[in-house]
Every structure is written in C-alpha cells, then in structure tokens.
Image (tube, rainbow, N blue to C red):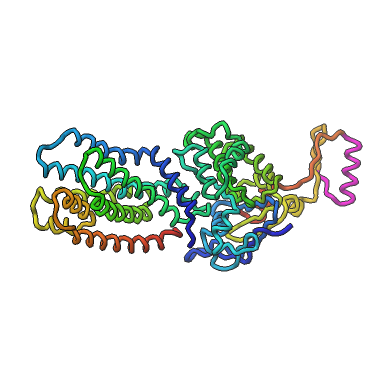
Amino acid sequence: MNSIIEFEDVHKQFKEKKALTDVNFSIKKGEIFGLVGPSGVGKTTTIKLLTDQLKPSEGAIRVFGESVTGNHTRLLSKMGILSDRSVLYERLSLYDNLRFLASLYDRPVSTIEDILEHVGLASSRKAAYKNLSKGMKQRANLAAALIHAPEILILDEPTASLDPSAKANVHAFLRQLNEQGSTIFLTSHDMNEIESLCHRVAFMIDGTIYLCDEPAQIRSMYAAPTVTVTFADGNVETFNNSYTGMTSLRNAIESRKVQSLHSDEPSLTDIFLDVTGRKFA
Amino acid sequence: MSLSMRRIFAIVRKDRKDSMKSANIVPVLLIPVGMALMFAYVMPSDLDMMFEMYVGVILLNLLFISGVVPANSLAEEKEKGTLRMLLYTPTSIAELLIGKNIHYFCLSLIGVLLSLLILQVPISWGYFLVAVIPVAFFCIVLSSTVGLLANNNGQIMITLFPVIMGMYFISSMADLYNVAFIYTIKRFLPIEIFYDAFYVSYYGGSFPWFSLVVTLCWITVISIIFAVVYRKQRYT
C-alpha cells in the first residue's frame, strides 16, 4: 500500500510555545489511522497543518506525494473534513446546504440524494439544519464532508459530543466507508473509539508521536506474560506463560471446573497511561 | 490567486436564500421599504420637504443594505462557525467576499429601485447610477472591512452602525441646523454625492463633480484599508 499522507520531521512553534516537535508518521491508502492523546497535545494543530490552515515551522507534509503548502485548493478537493465543531447553515434546509457544497465542488445535484440515503437522512432533507437533533446534525456534517466523494476523510474528534447510540451509528458508517475504500485519519481522546475503528494508532503526547503501531501489536507489546483463571469454586489463580506455568494451567483446567479464563492484556487506555504517565483530559 | 466564478455564484445563491430567512437581515431590508410605503401615503405639499423626505428614505435603504448587512453576514459566518466549514472547502476568503458583495450590491440596487418606484421620484438613469453606485460601493467595502475585523454582530452594532447612522443624520439634517461646521463635514462625506446627484436631477444645475471626486477619494482610502485588513485577517 502507498502512503497518501506523510508527516516528515514536522515542527510547529507558536511564538514561545512548541506545539509539535519532530512529528513523523504516514498513512496508507485504505487505512483508518488514529491519532490519540489528551486535549491540547497537538492533535488539532496536526489537522490544521494537514489542511494548510497553518504552516509548519520546519519539516514537510505531503498528501498524495505533493506538498500541502501552495496546493491548498487542489488537495482540499480530495479531502473531506469533519470535527465536533463542524456546522452547516442553520436556516437553510439540509438539502440546500448540501446543494451549496456540491456546487462549490462542482458535483452534480444527483449525488445529494445518494449521500442523504447513505447517512440515513433522506426523510429530513427539507428540515432546516437548526431543527435537527445533535446526532442528526453530526450525520449531516458527515454528509457535507462526503459530498465531493473525498479520497481521504479527516475527522477531528467527530463523536466528542454525541451520545453512545449516535456514536455507534457514526462508527458503523465510518467502517462502511472504509470498506468501500476511503482512507480515514481520525483524532480522538476516546480510546475505545480508536481501538474499535483503527488499523493503526499513534500516541501523541506534548506534541510528539510517542508510539505508532497496530492496536493488537501495541497491546501484545505491553501484555503481561500471565493468564488469569477463575474456577467454579470462586478461586482465582494466575499462571505465567513459561513452560511450567502452562503445564500447571493444563493440570488445573483438567482437574477443576473453570468459570473463566483470560490473558492479562491491557487496554490501549492502560498502555497509554502507563507509557506516558498522563491522564486523559 | 485563482478565482472560480462557479464558487462565487454558489455563494451568491446561498446568501440569497439564507438572507431571506434571517431575522437580522429581513427587518433591515423591510424597514426602509416600509418607510417608503408610509411616505408614499403621507404626501407633503412642500416640494422641498418632499425631496428631502424621499431622498432620505432611499438613502437610508441604501446605507442599511450595503453598509450594515454585509458586515452582519460576515460576522455571523464567523460567530456560527460556517466560515471555518467554508475554509475546509476549496473556497477562498476572496471568493467568499466577492460572492457576498455581489449579492448585497444587487440587493441594494433592488431596494433603491423599489423605493424609487414606491415614491415615484423622478430621476434620470445617468444620475441614478452616479448617486447609487459609488455610495453602494463605498458602503460595501467599508462593511466588508468591519466584517473582517468583527467577531460577532454585537461588535458590528457598536462600531459600524453609529458610523453609518452618523453619516446619514449629518447628511440629511445639516440643512435644519444651518451651522457652517456641520455643512463643511457634510460636503466631505462619502455619501454626499447621493444627495447632490438627486438634487441636480430634481432641480437642475451643474454636474456634482466635487462630491463625486470626494466619494472616489473615500473609495480609494477605504479600499486601501480593506486590502491591509484582508492581508492581515485571511489567515486568522
């Protein structure tokens, strides 16, 4: 797979404050890539650099092999961008909003109906944006981000303000988009979201990428070498994964009734807290 | 910088629909037309008074639509966050401003023509263009400049609105007070060409070159200020 987004030795400084230091990562075509970290560590700055709203102090950012700087208009037409602060024109109907955006991208009006069907808002097409519920608004924003069939979807904390049910709908929709070939770059401070959606994840702390790999790889890297067994009589025993430990485990399973058995693999949240010594804000 | 006419006219169409549903903008559009309708029924017998009244109403219409509404609209885009959304599309700030200004310029002309029609003020097309175009242009550039600087409609109301109303009152009330100082200010106001062009068309006289030059000077000054503000604000 080819890298379609590349950050190479990127630094960003705001007067005295260093926002990003030596950021390096790449995102491959068809991948869901998650950038996680507490609020204020530089996730949104990364997105602003990627969308040419900010210029890097040092380093190079390339999308489809082209530098972002100076190619803003062409590259933005290949990106769909959504954040929890995304909004549309509240007095206009959903259809009018999407028609306006379609004309900005020179897309046919016929795509609007398809997108509305896709996000499950076809029946609300005439409703004013301000009259939609929060979950519907975020789906409408997603429709707006998808109106020009972007090759890359950039999502800045897209479900930050949604309830669990609306969040699950958005997740399902993102998986569906990814299966259809969209590359998704997602920032979040919700580890469950990242764990359930992303093929690869980067931990960002104080403007630096701390760790970048597949969630399963990260979990196995930090997994404790033990297995915990709960027996039917209520006893809980831990076995390590050495030869003798595994032999004892086999003997125990054969001789007693087991209620549950699980490997002591930490969650991404546990690993993040362990690695960085930080709490999520 | 490349400008796309397709995107500019998409913004014109969007603003046309949006402004017709705005509780901020619709009254600004309706009040002067309502005043024109009211004055059309209260016909003063004195011709001079009729002239002052009619021209005053039409000028108010022009100043509101071209002077206040564009700034309101731009500040609202910032306040509500739709400007951020637009900047995630290939649309540039220049295209947004041009699109908005075309829309409000056309709306100003429609408002003035509607008032003229209601009040049945006799004016030649030549003088109409000299009276309306430079003033509308000045007001739109002034309004866009303030709109770029302001973050919300409250800031527009405490900065731009007093300037617009101040110009209007000095221009329309100077004759009542007959004070030399006020007259001098009035002569150098950017909107004075409006009164002078209507006056010449109504009563006859020589072409108001002085007022036209004053307005053109103001347009030059405000355009320079606009360019400076635009360069500073487009990345903010």
Q: Nearer the viewer, residue B155 or A109?
A: A109
User: Quadrant of residue A40 in the image?
Assistant: bottom right
Please indicate, yes or no, whether residue B163 appears anywhere in the rendered image.
no
What's the magenta region?
A: A238-256
Q: Classify residue A230 as left or right of residue A272.
A: right
Q: Which quarter of the rendered picture does the C terminus of chain B lie within?
A: bottom left
Q: Position of residue A266 (x, y in %)?
A: 72, 48
Task: Name the residue: 62% across, 50% down.
Answer: A150
A255 falls in the magenta region: yes
Q: Position of residue B51 (x, y in %)?
A: 15, 44
Q: Nearer the viewer, residue B81 or A41?
A: B81
Q: Classify residue B98 as left or right of residue A75.
A: left
Q: Classify residue A239 as left or right of residue A66.
A: right
Dominant SS of magenta comes to: helix
Q: Position of residue B118 (x, y in %)?
A: 24, 37
Q: Nearer the viewer, residue A198 or A264?
A: A198
Q: Position of residue A28 (x, y in %)?
A: 70, 56
A144 falls in the magenta region: no
Task: Name the residue: 77% across, 51% down.
Answer: A220
Task: Name the residue: 20% across, 54% down.
Answer: B192
Please indicate, yes or no, whether residue A93 appears anywhere in the rendered image.
yes
Residue found at the far bottom of this picture: A58
| Total numbered labels placed on residues in the image | 0
